[in-house]
């Protein structure tokens, strides 16, 4: 079913610094998964210069974070965050925002980009010189015991991005809810997993589904994921195999939260 990752762990969430497509075309792209009052994650995965990426963290805290926070306080966004790569592919940083209305979120994102360039032009240019390329992704939460927000995330997270057969992806959603979710929820109750979410693709990239978990430490989180994966397979191997056939390849990432700071600071 799932693979066993060596001693790490992670959750993903995401944000879009440069999505310029109209919201109407976004909705048309994935009408089947967009429903009222759902929780969206708009995100940007950055490829950064590894020798300078820690300074990008400083720039985000100093110049970008306060702008995002204003839009949270205005009610346009539910929250925002900045994650650091711990293990996985080429993405080194994740900037994300959450909300319930995609039109409002996209308008806020456009305003944030303009405010960045107006209020902190030198910092904006410096950041782009460090993290000069990115991939934009937007998701809508399809399953999980509660809406994933920056406020309820643990300090570390574990994300698995799935490439799925589009004809079968709704069946994959059913399997997650029927087979996997009860086992994951047991680990939430025991404290081994802080939050989890199953997210459906709205726009961006080749991945169709995203599973996210957050927790207190990577080893504990990885152990929890391996535990529930084994339990679900033992309960219904045929259904677990069906999931693997629908979502037959994946990319794992482990992340560490940088902002908002795990101790509650800005």
Image: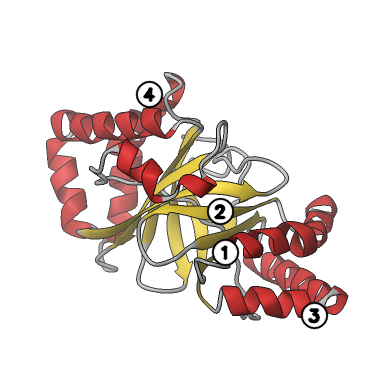
> Residue 146 or 264: which is nearer the viewer?
146
Q: What mark, if any, has residue 70 been given in the picture?
A: 4
Give the foreground label among 2 and 1.
1
Find numbered disc 2 in the image and state the secondary structure of the residue it sits on: strand
The residue under the point 18% across, 42% down is 123
The residue identified by callout 1 is 169
Disc tally is: 4
Q: What mark, if any, has residue 198 been given in the picture?
A: none
The residue identified by callout 2 is 199
The residue under the point 13% across, 47% down is 125
The residue under the point 33% across, 29% down is 108
Give the foreground label among 2 and 3.
3
Give the foreground label among 2 and 4.
2
Q: Is residue 62 visible?
A: no
The residue identified by callout 3 is 237
Mark sitting earlier along the chain (4/3): 4
């Amino acid at each position: 079913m799932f693979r066993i990752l060596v001693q790490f762990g992670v959750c993903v969430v995401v944000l879009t610094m440069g999505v310029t497509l109209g919201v109407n075309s976004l909705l048309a792209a994935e009408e089947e998964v967009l429903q009222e009052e759902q929780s969206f994650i708009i995100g940007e995965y950055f490829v950064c210069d590894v020798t300078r990426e820690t300074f990008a963290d400083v720039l985000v805290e100093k110049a970008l974070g306060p702008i995002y926070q204003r839009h949270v306080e205005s009610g346009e966004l539910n929250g925002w965050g900045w994650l650091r790569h711990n293990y996985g592919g080429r993405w080194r940083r994740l900037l994300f925002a959450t909300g319930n209305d995609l039109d409002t979120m996209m308008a806020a994102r456009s305003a944030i980009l303009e405010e960045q360039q107006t209020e902190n032009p030198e910092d904006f240019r410096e950041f782009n010189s460090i993290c000069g390329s990115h991939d934009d992704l937007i998701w809508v939460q399809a399953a999980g015991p509660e809406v994933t927000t920056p406020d309820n995330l643990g300090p570390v997270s574990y994300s698995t991005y799935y490439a799925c057969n589009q004809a079968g992806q709704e069946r994959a959603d059913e399997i997650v809810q029927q087979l996997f979710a009860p086992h994951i929820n047991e680990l939430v109750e025991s404290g081994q997993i802080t939050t989890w979410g199953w997210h459906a693709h709205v726009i961006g990239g080749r991945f169709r589904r995203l599973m996210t978990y957050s927790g207190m430490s990577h080893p504990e989180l990885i152990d929890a994921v391996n535990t529930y994966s084994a339990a679900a397979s033992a309960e219904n191997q045929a259904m677990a195999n069906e999931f693997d056939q629908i979502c037959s390849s994946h990319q794992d990432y482990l992340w560490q939260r940088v902002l908002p700071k795990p101790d509650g600071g800005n």
